[in-house]
Image: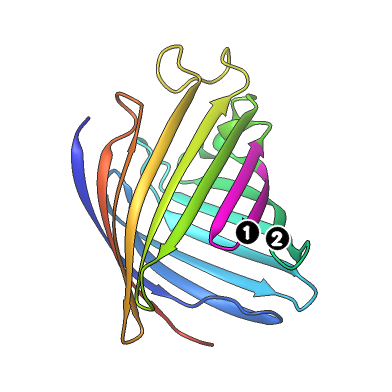
Amino acid sequence: MRKSILYTLCFCSFPTLADTSVTITGVSQTQEDPAIQASFDWAGDTGWYAGVWGSNVDFGEDTNIEFDGYVGYYTALNDVLNLDVGIAQYTYHGADVSSSYNYAEAYAKFNYGNTNLNFWYAWDYFGTGAGHSIVMLTHNFPVNESFSVDVGIDYSMSMDDDKWTWEGKDDDYIHWRVTGNYSVSGWDLSLGYEDTDLDTYGDSTILFTVGKTFSL
């Protein structure tokens, strides 16, 4: 697989309970060219939240905009275990056929300390009619107050390989990543490596991110 280096510049604000936030992010999503992303989020003090997210994209034809909406509920199950459940709607724009890619996805995310176990399920993945699921496990290792290391692995699977596969007859793949995070003077920097077991779709990637959080 081809190796690539991606540079990401993030200017971010994050929601607190019963508040709203706006996030603007620069990230590589357009075949290793920069993308500009923005989101608007609301989080209530009862655990409910909602938001919208948009980005320019490049899927190899005239589809150049992705616009998503989501609504969910976050709650503490007990003193150590938290649950986040919700549904997201993904929409695509730019070409006459772009809307045919639209699909919805439900998710459930469990948090235990520095460990997260997340699940996603789509019943019409990218408008193909295929069921599709993802399971992800991540863990954060704090080194000191400024530096930490994230490790994660996720598994994606098509449940209808007659409607959707990733490569030939491969209806699943594994993706993994290792990222170092450093915070200094209000800035958040990260440098990570990620890869998949795909031969053509998944590039091994070095990803560098610079971010700053602004309170509203």
Q: Residue placed at 69% from the left, 58% from the top? A: 84
Inspect the image, locate mark 1, and give the three-letter code of the amino acid beneath it.
Tyr
Query: Which residue is found at the position 45% from the left and 27% from the top?
Result: 173
Position of residue 7 relative to residue 176, above or below, is below
Residue 112 has which mark?
1
Q: Amino acid at mark 2?
A: Leu
Q: Is residue 117 magenta?
A: yes
Give the residue displayed 51% in from the left and 38% down from the top. 98
* Foreground pick, 92 / 75: 75
Dot 2, how many residues are within 10 Å of its Cα: few (below 14), some (14-19), or many (20+)? some
- Disc 1 and disc 2 in contact, CB within 8 angstroms: yes
User: In the image, what residue occupies the spot 71% across and 68% down?
Assistant: 49
Is residue 187 depicted above or below 73 in this figure? below
Q: Secondary structure at mark 1?
A: strand
Q: Position of residue 216 (x, y in %)?
A: 54, 88
How dense is the environment of label 1, judged by Cα within 10 Å: few (below 14), some, or many (20 and up)? few
Q: Nearer the viewer, residue 80 or 176?
A: 80
* Residue 51 rendering spot, x and y as whole percentages: 63, 65
Q: Is residue 48 left or right of residue 136?
A: right
Q: Which residues are magenta?
A: 105-121
User: Disc 2 marks which residue?
Assistant: 81
- Residues 109 and 32: in front is 109
Give the mark count: 2
Say whether residue 95 is visible: yes
Q: CA distance from mark 1 to mark 2?
A: 5 Å
From the top left corner, tell me how far across and down residue 78 is, in percent. Answer: 78, 64
Vertical side of 173 occupied by 48: above or below? below
- Residue 18 percent across, percent down from the top left: 71, 81
47 relative position to 151: left or right: right
